[in-house]
Image (spheres, rainbow, N blue to C red):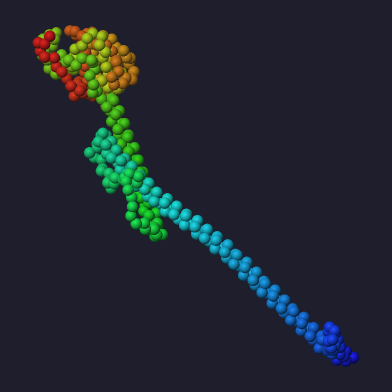
Amino acid sequence: MKFTWFQSKLTFVIIPEANGSVVRLKLSRAALWSALFLMLLLSGTTCTLLIRSWHSTVSVSLKSVEMKGRATQLEQDLHRKNAAIERLQNDIYALSKQAEEVRSQMERLKRLEQDLNKLAPGSAERRKTGGQPVSAAVSAHAGGMGGEAFPVTEGQTHELAAAAGARYTALHAEIKELASRLGQTKRQLQEKQERQRRTPDIWPTLSKIVTSPYGYRKDPFTNKLSFHRGIDIAGKLGDPVYAVAGGVVQSVGYDKLHGHNVVIEHDKGLKTWYMHLNSAQVNRGDKVGKGQTIGQLGTTGRSTGPHLHYEVLLSGKSTDPAPYMPSVKRKKEGKK
């Protein structure tokens, strides 16, 4: 029954315009359905191909846009990296210039150290500081510049960075060593200054006229040969008498031989003694500085007139004060 349904025919009548003959088409149901199926199949295939073609076109367009975006991003990244590399190269160059400047400063510090060593005791035993000579640099704005430009390669950049790093490493070690040496030099200079402060090297009076030097002489009272343990310096009554070095007042006293007198202890067993003072202006235990007034010139005790008897004691024994004074002028005999 079903088979005969497919074999049954359908007649299609096509009526044209006037004066045209009528066309009749007879098709079996199977042929008609086959034609419809083929049309549907063809339409579906065409739609599928169109959809795939459209999808492919859209995909290509999207990929093209994506690739363009990636290319733009990569180009921007490359530009940023090139800029970063250029900044890095400039920074490395600046570091190398700074290293050269620090090196120049190190050379100046070394020369300063040499000058300090000359002032410090034992400078002859100092070891000489080495180092390359400082090259004179001229500012880029002081003159013309030119020449062909050769881009710096990656290898040259690494070499410059390694050289700058090596310079800074070497400079760090040199600065550390120099700081130690300068610290030692400073301590030695401070010790030298302290010794100088506590070493007699100035006149104890305004006057520099020596009326009786250290050594043998005829005693002014007995006219007999005697030994004079200090020097007598003439002056005006009431003139200031100065401590010839920093120290501590060991004693302040009076007796009929020395009159008013002051003894100051300085350094390493060195003492100075000031006699025949009109008065003393310090007390036992006072700390005094070099050049500080400790009394007034007088003529107390065993004295023939206003003067200062200045005596230097080394390890408890009198010694010639002349080496501890800038210069000594002796009053000529018979000069009024």
- What residue is shown at x 10% (from left), y 13% (from top)? 333
Q: Nearer the viewer, residue 15 or 206?
A: 15
**Does residue 280 appear anywhere in the picture?**
yes
Q: Image quadrant of residue 195?
A: top left
Relative to residue 10, is residue 78 drawn left or right? Answer: left
Q: Nearer the viewer, residue 65 or 21?
A: 21
Q: Nearer the viewer, residue 16 or 234?
A: 16
Estimate the x, y position of residue 234 in percent, counting from the top left: 19, 12
Estimate the x, y position of residue 12 in percent, counting from the top left: 85, 86
Which quarter of the rendered picture does the N terminus lie within? bottom right
- What residue is shown at x 59% (from left), y 67% (from top)? 64
Q: Is residue 97 above or below residue 236?
A: below
Estimate the x, y position of residue 184 in percent, counting from the top left: 32, 37
Estimate the x, y position of residue 242 in percent, counting from the top left: 27, 17
Q: Is residue 123 above or below residue 39?
A: above
Q: Is residue 214 above or below residue 101?
A: above
- What residue is shown at x 70% (from left), y 74% (from top)? 51
